[in-house]
Image (cartoon, grey):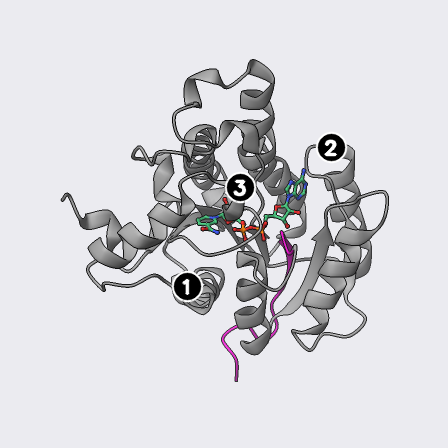
Amino acid sequence: MGLMDNKRGIVFGIANDRSYAWHISNQLAQAGAQLAFTHLPDPKGKMERRCRSAISELGIEDPWLMPCDASKDEDIQAVFDKLQKDFGTIDFVVHSIAFADRQFLQIGNFHTTTREAWTQAIDISAYTLLAMTRGAAPLMTNGGSIIAMTYYGGEKIIPGYNIMGIAKAALEHTARYLAEELGEKNIRVNTISGGPLRTLASSAVGGIDKMYEHQQAKAPLRRNITGDEVGNTAVFLLSDMASAITGENIYVDAGFNIVGL
Ligand SMILES: NC(=O)c1ccc[n+]([C@@H]2O[C@H](COP(=O)([O-])OP(=O)(O)OC[C@H]3O[C@@H](n4cnc5c(N)ncnc54)[C@H](O)[C@@H]3O)[C@@H](O)[C@H]2O)c1
């Protein structure tokens, strides 16, 4: 009997088999969840091919998969319309997407961020949680659980994280407002603050190598984290085991966030 038997939901954010979303999906699938996925559309179909190949590594053949550029309301709406048609109801949503122009993710250049880059980062990395929740809520007739991925750079200064830190602060507080408003429908909204993991997105952050080294040296567990460890926490938050947990930010960072020096 798996923790997620009889639960189905959607995962946004598998770019490849290193994505946080992939590790989360892996643990969800092993716990018995039924999964739907989206990929970022691109004209040559490269993203779709990479996403399909990563999903097949999960042992899922013929997946429910739709394109979704989360900066477009109509794409998000189309995903939830199709989910409603195919499944009727869903139990969970995994938001594991973020974007910022890498030009502004270099150490020392936060102050050069343009209005356009600022707006785009917050739109794609934070507003999308609200938009997805709005799409998902009508399908969560038996209650539901929504999680989004964040990082400690949303609370403290991590040189190079820059505009993404501002977007994560917005994401975390968006999750709290959503949790308060949707609690009466038994829909829970939480964030997971994961330690640094080598992915496509993290390679765009200027100070990323320093982050791994610092984490290894200073975290109470004296190491970096694994994708599985984030996946396990995601399963917990999306399952009924976490039925009284909402509006929280759970750290999966080997304890790094408690250290002052
Ligand atoms: N890797 C880390 O060190 C780390 C640490 C903490 C939090 N996170 C967060 O985890 C989440 C996933 O990132 P990741 O590290 O797995 O990298 P990743 O590159 O594997 O995933 C990022 C995903 O965002 C998607 N995306 C970007 N713009 C989009 C758009 N407009 N519409 C739809 N999807 C879009 C990409 O297609 C990709 O699938 C992000 O929110 C990231 O900030 C990552």
> Is residue 9 on the magenta stretch?
yes
Residue at 65% over, 54% down: 15
Task: Give the CA distance from mark 1 to mark 2.
Answer: 29 Å
Q: Which mark is residue 233?
A: 1
Q: Magenta region: which residues?
A: 1-14
Q: Residue 96 in the image: x percent, y percent?
A: 56, 49
Identify the mark nearer the N-term, 1 or 2: 2
Secondary structure that dominates the magenta span: loop
Judging by the rendered image, the residue that carries numbered circle 3 is 204
Task: Check contact, mark 1 vs mark 2: CB within 8 A.
Answer: no
Is the C-beta of the residue carrying label 2 under 8 Å from the nearest atom of ligand 1? yes
Q: Is residue 84 visible?
A: no
Depth check, front residue: 109 or 162:
109
* Amino acid type, label 1: Thr
Judging by the rendered image, the residue that carries numbered circle 2 is 72
* Amino acid type, label 3: Ala
Identify the mark nearer the N-term, 1 or 3: 3
